[in-house]
């Protein structure tokens, strides 16, 4: 079992702690992602595993071998960089064959293995072309083939899709998963893109300020964030400042702060034992909320609050509503399942009801940071005024 064990790894640059006493294990054959904002330490961590950076403290184990001080070429680890680093004067075939030629592998074996790799990445018909004559996605495939031809135990991918457009990134994610399944080795993937990490990973680790904030399967991190940062960074969510008013057998009653002395009451199930009077944060994903101009029928396990639509954004597969409740702004996603031409669409500044099941909210044992305005924390400081201004202009004409 060639699992990777990181033990108390620390790295600093001129007194700045880039990676802070990090420990974790990556299982053999796993596709593991490091996810976080720029400067969180994820690339530094990857470079230490690759051997391009030396840790200040701690060690890196590949199976039973301590590789902490080994140079990159002595590790059974290969890296794919964001810029691919292909040799422009060599053909696709020669780029993939290069590492084997350096090792003086027999010509027949080189030819067999190169053709096998090019077939794996579906580039066998491009073997005679040069890098400047193929697309970005094809360059990515060549880089993968070149990295895999040495039969590494671990493949490191540092933001490998960042230079590609959206459609090509989505296509290459599927290709990467297929290649991973075909070769069966450990992939470690670094990205700042939440959707990439969510779709490709067996497990992921969310990083911030050199620390791992939360790790686990992507659906677990998304549905059950361990902190405000995890909830805020992974996907999109509404963060609601709340105080526990009573505790029942299966749920808690919460008084939620809407700002300017306004409050509303909701219920939520709980996964830790809160105390009456405890201040905490409720995370509620936008797709969990239903929106209607009519008040829903009262049910014990359904939360209902009233607000006013402040903005509407049509996004193709769904419409996004920004609904103001006191000083809070709720982001709500309404899926386009079917269009009813005789239905009157919800409009700007229209009163609406928001409702959701009490199991769809998630309690976070943290208080919303004092520097975070409760009126803006829900909407990620995005510019929602544009579409509303256009709508009003059209109305005035």
Image (tube, rainbow, N blue to C red):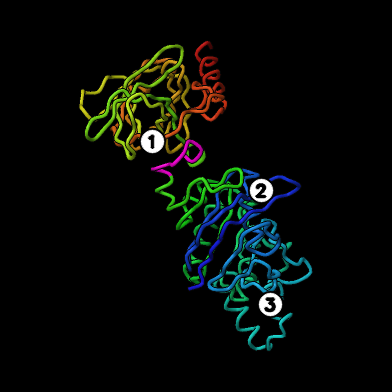
Per the image, the residue denoted by label 3 is 97
Give 73 or 17, whichever is nearer the viewer: 17
Instruction: Calculate the distance from the C-alpha at mark 1 to the C-alpha at mark 3.
Output: 48 Å
Above or below residue 95? Residue 364 is above
Residue 280, percent from left and from top: 41, 29
Q: Residues within 10 Å of mark 3 (few under 14, many from 20)?
A: many
Q: Eyeballing the image, is 348 above or below 178?
A: above
Task: State which mark lies toward you, 2 or 1.
Answer: 2
Query: Is there CB contact under 8 Å for labels 2 and 3?
Result: no
In the image, is residue 110 part of the stretch drawn in magenta? no
Where disc 1 sits, the SS reads helix
Inter-mark Cα distance, 2 to 3? 36 Å
The answer to which of marks 2 and 3 sits earlier in the sequence is: 2
Query: Percent from the top left, x then y, of residue 300?
Result: 20, 27
Q: Residue 381 appears at what percent x and percent y?
A: 56, 27
What's the mark number on residue 351?
none
The residue under label 2 is 18
Task: Name the residue at 51% across, 38% down.
Answer: 229
Along the viewing direction, whichever of 140 and 281 lies nearer the viewer: 281
Q: Which badge, 2 or 1, is on the more N-terminal residue?
A: 2
Q: Which residues are magenta?
A: 222-231
Q: Which residue is mark 1?
A: 287
Please tell me whether mark 3 sits on a helix, a strand or a loop: helix
């Amino acid at each position: 079992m060639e699992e990777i064990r990181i033990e108390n790894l620390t790295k600093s640059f001129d007194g700045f702690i880039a990676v802070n006493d990090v420990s974790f294990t990556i299982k053999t054959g796993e596709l593991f992602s490091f996810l976080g904002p720029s400067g969180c330490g994820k690339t530094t961590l990857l470079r230490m595993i690759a051997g391009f950076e030396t840790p200040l403290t701690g060690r890196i184990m590949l199976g039973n071998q301590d590789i902490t001080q080994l140079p990159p070429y002595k590790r059974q680890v290969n890296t794919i960089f964001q810029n691919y680093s292909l040799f422009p004067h060599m053909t696709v075939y020669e780029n993939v064959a290069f590492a084997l030629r350096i090792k003086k592998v027999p010509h027949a074996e080189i030819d067999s293995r190169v053709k096998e790799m090019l077939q794996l990445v579906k580039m066998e018909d491009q073997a005679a072309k040069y890098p400047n004559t193929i697309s970005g996605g094809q360059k990515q495939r060549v880089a993968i083939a070149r990295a895999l031809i040495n039969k590494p135990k671990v493949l490191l991918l540092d933001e490998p899709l960042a230079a590609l457009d959206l459609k090509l990134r989505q296509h290459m994610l599927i290709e990467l998963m297929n290649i991973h399944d075909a070769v069966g080795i450990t992939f470690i993937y670094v990205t700042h893109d939440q959707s990439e990490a969510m779709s490709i990973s067996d497990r992921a680790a969310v990083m911030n300020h050199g620390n791992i904030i939360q790790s686990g399967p992507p659906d677990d991190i998304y549905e059950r964030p361990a902190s405000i940062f995890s909830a805020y960074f992974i996907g999109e969510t509404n963060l609601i400042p709340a105080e526990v008013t009573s505790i029942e057998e299966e749920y808690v009653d919460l008084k939620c702060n809407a700002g300017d002395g306004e409050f509303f009451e909701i219920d939520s199930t709980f996964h830790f034992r809160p105390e009456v009077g405890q201040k905490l944060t409720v995370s509620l994903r936008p797709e969990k909320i239903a929106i209607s101009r009519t008040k829903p029928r009262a049910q014990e396990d359904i939360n209902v609050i009233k607000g006013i639509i402040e903005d509407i954004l049509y996004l193709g597969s769904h419409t996004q509503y920004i609904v103001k409740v006191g000083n809070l702004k709720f982001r709500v996603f309404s899926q386009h399942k079917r269009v009813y031409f005789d239905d009157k669409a919800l409009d700007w500044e229209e009163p609406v009801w928001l409702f959701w099941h009490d199991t769809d909210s998630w309690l976070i044992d943290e208080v919303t940071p004092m520097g975070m305005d409760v009126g803006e924390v829900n909407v990620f400081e995005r510019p929602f005024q544009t579409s509303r201004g256009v709508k009003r202009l059209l109305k005035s004409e």
